[in-house]
Image (cartoon, rainbow, N blue to C red):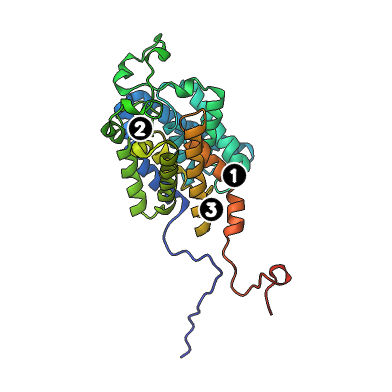
Amino acid sequence: MENTEKLLVTSSPHVRRNRSVQKEMLDVVIALVPAGLAAIYYFGLRALLLIAVSVLTCLLSETLFNKAIKKENTIKDCSAIVTGILLAFNVPCTLPVWQIVIGAAFAIVVVKMAFGGIGQNIVNPALAARAFMLASWPSAMTNFIAPDKISQLKDGVDIAAITSATPLSDPESYKLMDLFLGNIPGSLGEVSALALMIGFVYLLIRRVVSIKMPLIYIFTASVLLGLFNGFDNILRDILSGGMLLGAFFMLTDYTTSPVTPNGQIVFAVLAGFLTAIIRSFGGYPEGVSYSILLANLVVPIIEKYTMPKVFGVDYTKNKGVANE
């Protein structure tokens, strides 16, 4: 009796895991929950309001854009939710709601959907929106309030009168434990190093991201910051600002980071180098957002020169024509 079973042979890539974009994005959302809860704990319900408005605006913007171009709605992949959360994590609790609405719409319509949607954008939408908002409303984007002053944030109160210096601006004013737990002024999602680490460990366990790029990025930035400014405040540099948020959740973005192994190393080193340069010699004490955005822009070049050679191709003759 003949065996009628046939072996189906297909070209790569071969799917080995029951994963999808939606599942990956949902895992990222779950990983962001600890930092979101920390933001609500320290900054109150206004943090929850900004996160909710940002997410809803991203979902609505993507829905309306798809409807306008008569394309199937793509919000089911949940990437807009991730963008909305990350954008909210990069703003202070004092930011006017209408400004984050504009920022979220910019992230989705201009940075993501105008380039073709998920997988086509050339830079991280949340970081690009943050840069846009910082250029548009520099004062509002840098009004940081310490958690113990949140009760003073009421209608009619001069926000500038109750703002506090961030750890990057005044590193000696805060204890390391405060930096680790999040009891400091800063953007919503960057304050609690502990919450960010918990979320990152979850992503590692779920195999959504690799530890390679974040580790190389943090190591490169830390070493250079130590060389430029002294090694006494290395731990403070790591725990302050958006270094961990950027390393764990934005540097590892699939769309805007290299796919080649060597390219990922170059990308992480470049971002770490730029972060150290901006923090040490720039007029802005942060630097994570701009460093990752600038590194995003050169990803095609990085991939071009780090692409593994194809087996069976002689690159020394006939400009890469395969040997017969």
| Residue type, mark 1 in image | Leu
| Residue type, mark 2 in image | Val
The single residue placed furthest to the top in the displayed view is 156
Q: Earlier in the sequence, mark 2 or mark 3?
A: 2
Question: In this rendering, does residue 249 appear at all?
Answer: no
The single residue placed furthest to the left in the displayed view is 177
In the rendered image, residue 204, in percent from the top left (x then y), is placed at 36, 52
The residue that label 3 is drawn on is: 258
Q: Label 2 to label 1, Cα distance in Å? A: 27 Å
Does residue 314 appear left or right of residue 51 in this picture?
Answer: right
Q: Label 2 to label 3, Cα distance in Å? A: 28 Å
Q: Residue at the location (60% across, 35% down)?
A: 110
Image quarter of the C terminus: bottom right
Element carrying mark 2:
loop
Q: Which mark is residue 121?
A: none
Q: Foreground: 177 or 135? A: 177
The residue that label 2 is drawn on is: 191
The residue that label 1 is drawn on is: 297
Numbered circles on residues, count: 3
